[in-house]
Amino acid sequence: MTDNKDRNEPGDVQGALDSIQEMKRAALWRAMPPRWFGAIIALLAGALVALSVAGLREYHVYIIILMALVLLYQSQKTGVSVRQFPSKLTGIALIILIPLFFLLIVVAQTLSDRLGYVWASLSAGVVLAIAVYTLSVFERRRHLTRVGAEKGE
Amino acid sequence: MKMPLFDTVIHAPNRLQICAFLSPLEEAEFQVLREELDVSDSVLSKHIKQLEEAGYVKQRKSKVNGRQRTFAYLTEKGRKAFENHVEELKRLLVSDKKAQKLTNTGWR
């Protein structure tokens, strides 16, 4: 590559384009959260519901602090933040997750007479954890597809 | 429609890599850029400064856990210039291939 337009060779231009794709892919790869990240956030979200059902709301603050720490650790570890908005499907899923959170609490509290508080709170927690984990898996796949698209461009 | 423009500030190998790395990101830490480009602090600083002077990149400093961290990001102007530059490279490649084809078929 040279700084002069007139001296560019075809191989030079191709090399520059290849280098661009390589760097874009490296950037997206770095920004991708690991599998454990989705799993931990899912577990903590599940724990939040389970504690609500069990009536242990005073412990919410610890879960929220843990969530914030995990998010902070992840952003510090990668050293990059990706420039992309959540996909349409993720947006819809997030809109569904919030009502689902409250719905699970109400349903579990209703069922707690039959199941007992322990099982009712655990079941509600597991349902939300599965929903959050599924969402994280979907987002990870979407990100991988984007990395692949940069590679194949 | 504005025609793509070849940008000599961006085209230097290290600066092209910096812009390419920052293009899909909101921002990247200085240390991450240095690792990816495999260059020294001074070399990276020099290139970032040149991009900053052109108004293509900006730096943001933040103190985390008592440690000073520097982040770099592409400005809107830089993003546009990089996109134009990539378009121009693609256009050059296509015209080179066409010229090559004409030469091979005996037209030139």
Image (cartoon, helix red, strand yellow):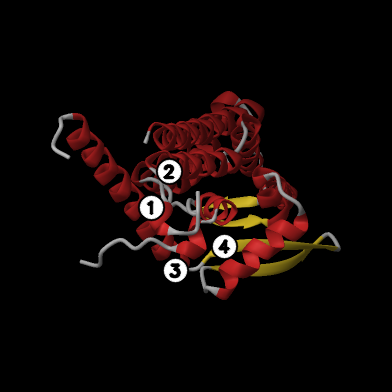
The residue labelled by disc 2 is: A17
Mark 4 and mark 3: span between their CA atoms? 10 Å
Name the mark nearer the viewer: 2 or 4.
Answer: 2
Q: Secondary structure at mark 4?
A: strand
Which of these two is toward me, A72 or A109? A72
**Amino acid on which the number 4 mark rests in the picture:** Tyr
Which mark, by number, is residue B76? Answer: 3
**Amino acid on which the number 1 mark rests in the picture:** Val
- Determine the chain carrying the residue at label 2: A
Mark 3 and mark 1: span between their CA atoms? 15 Å
**Amino acid on which the number 3 mark rests in the picture:** Glu
Q: Are marks 1 and 2 on the same chain?
A: no
Question: Does the rendering let one see residue A64?
Answer: no
Q: Position of residue B17 (x, y in %)?
A: 55, 50
Which mark, by number, is residue B73? Answer: 4
Q: Secondary structure at mark 2?
A: helix
> Of the residues under marks 1 and 4, which one precedes in the sequence?
4
Q: Residue furthest left?
A: B107
Q: Are marks 1 and 4 on the same chain?
A: yes
**Amino acid on which the number 2 mark rests in the picture:** Leu
The residue labelled by disc 1 is: B86
